[in-house]
Image (cartoon, helix red, strand yellow):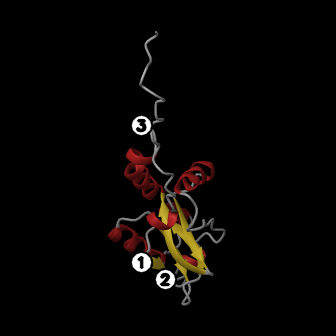
Amino acid sequence: MGIKSFMGKRAEPEKPAEVPILVRDYMVEDLITFREHENIMDVMEKLIKNGISGGCIVNEKNELLGIISEGDCMKEISDSRYYNMPMTDLTVGKRMKTDVLTIDANMNVLEAAKRFTDLKVRRFPIVENGKLIGQISQRDVLKAAVRFRSNTWNH
């Protein structure tokens, strides 16, 4: 009579449930925004005061018109010096980028991370029903990664 093993079938280690990590959950909703008629120097002061590297330009209906970055402001400083032109009469609308890439609030943060690396941008505005509802930055994606590393991603 042989010895029987009573170990039975080993249970597979449980994988954590796939938790959707949505852009909506990590986007910043309380944004510093600008209007296209604002003076570029005032915009630079707001960027510095608020410790941000750029912002969205919206109209009175909160529709996205463009985006301005520190780099855009630097270009203005450089051009003004080079062409010996005053910056006092320059509005943000003249320097903003209007071909703005946006992403969907319901996109998975992992997909957003891929978009950041593929497109080499620092931030994506999020527009819903034609209105600016938030923005996600590379740092926001890093926060999501750190928060969910222990229960959804291998380390």
Name the N-terminal-most of marks 1 and 3.
1
Residue 38 has which mark? 2
Residues 71 and 145: in front is 145
Amino acid type of the residue tagged 2 in the rendering: Glu
Residue 155 - label: 3
Q: Quadrant of residue 108?
A: bottom right
Taking depth in this image into account, of 1 and 4 the one nearest to the observer is 1
Looking at the image, which is closer to me, 48 or 120? 120
Mark 2 is surrounded, within 10 Å at the Cα level, by few (under 14), some (14 to 19) or many (20 or more) other residues, namely some
Instruction: Pick out the residue farthest to the top.
Output: 1
Query: Residue 41 at what x, y percent from top left?
Result: 43, 75
Query: Label 1, on which residue?
Result: 42
Q: CA distance from mark 3 to mark 2?
A: 47 Å
Farthest-out residue, front: 1
Q: Quadrant of the C terminus?
A: top left
Q: Amino acid at mark 3?
A: His
Give me the C-alpha separation between circle 1 and circle 2. 7 Å
